[in-house]
Image (cartoon, rainbow, N blue to C red):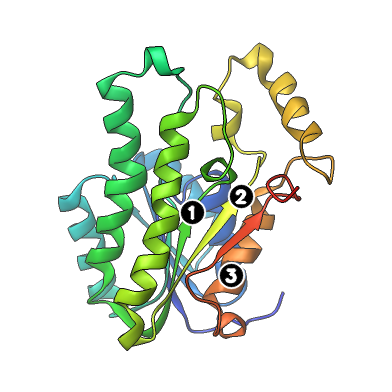
Amino acid sequence: MNKQLDGKIALVTGGTSGIGLATAQVLAAQGAQVFITGRRQAELDAAVDAIGAAATGIRADASKLTELDAVYAQIAKQAGRLDILFANAGGGDMQPLGAISEEHFDRIFGTNVRGVVFTVQKALPLLVDGASVILTGSTTSVKGTASFSVYSASKAAVRNFARSWALDLKDRGIRVNVVSPGPVRTPGLGELVPDEHRQGLFDALAAQVPLGRLGEPEEIGKVVAFLGSDAASFINGAELFVDGGMAQI
């Protein structure tokens, strides 16, 4: 693999599984020193082992501001800067309108919206001029999805963050973009339904994709690596759909 990120310092939040882990592996393979966060120490340790010597794990919940402070304090001490920030931590589950609870709303918006705001804000002192910030969006932000409205709305908010922050940070040349996956074969996708319905969900989603299959996590990771590289130096405020065409037709 090429080393287009040689010497770069990157942070991937939510880096212990799925898209986050695969992205951290791609970034490391392309030469970056990668910090990852995760909430559970055992999973964090396993992810660091899977990524290799270029990885450092920091246990943190991205929705908790004091823990974000600790993340950036450690990065400042060990690396002194950030070139790439992939604000990826997030998730959600399904509830129809009539069953949405305050807990459901607060949990999803707490991580997907509040967590993203402060993950990026608190990174600003470490981000170098010309750095790349990538946010994880979703095709659900532009499509209606039954029983998924709170998650979908949270990702629509993320899309606007990129538009607005690209303006806020223009004087520093910091690019802010969104990568929006379609259905990707991750543990999180499978956990939306009981085990016995998992393959049925995968098959139903794959049937909605023009390419006829689910995406793989590393396919998202390669796009994040591109956005973090100098090859994407004139891409800013954009949303790149990595969805096999699902939201494009």
Q: Mark 1: which secondary structure?
A: strand
Whole-percent x, y for residue 243 in the image: 69, 49
Q: Is residue 218 left or right of residue 229?
A: right
Q: Nearer the viewer, residue 96 or 65?
A: 96
Whole-percent x, y for residue 200 in the image: 74, 19
Question: Is residue 178 placed above or below 204 in the rendered structure?
Answer: below
**Contact (CB < 8 A) between labels 1 and 2?**
yes
Q: Residue at x 55, y 78 (%)?
A: 235
**Contact (CB < 8 A) between labels 1 and 3?**
no
Task: For marks 3 and 2, give the one nearer the viewer.
Answer: 2
Asked whether residue 165 is in view, the answer is yes
Distance Cα–Cα, label 1 vs label 2:
8 Å
Residue 219: quadrant of the picture: bottom right
Q: Residue at x 37, y 60 (%)?
A: 161
Q: Residue at x 48, y 54 (%)?
A: 136
Quick one: label 1 or label 3, which is nearer the N terminus? 1
Residue at image mark 1: 136
Q: Which mark is residue 225?
A: 3
Residue at image mark 2: 181
Whole-percent x, y for residue 247 in the image: 68, 47
Question: Is residue 154 placed above or below 25 in the rendered structure?
Answer: above
Question: Is residue 233 placed above or below 151 in the rendered structure?
Answer: below
Q: Looking at numbered disc 2 in the image, what kind of residue is underneath it? A: Pro
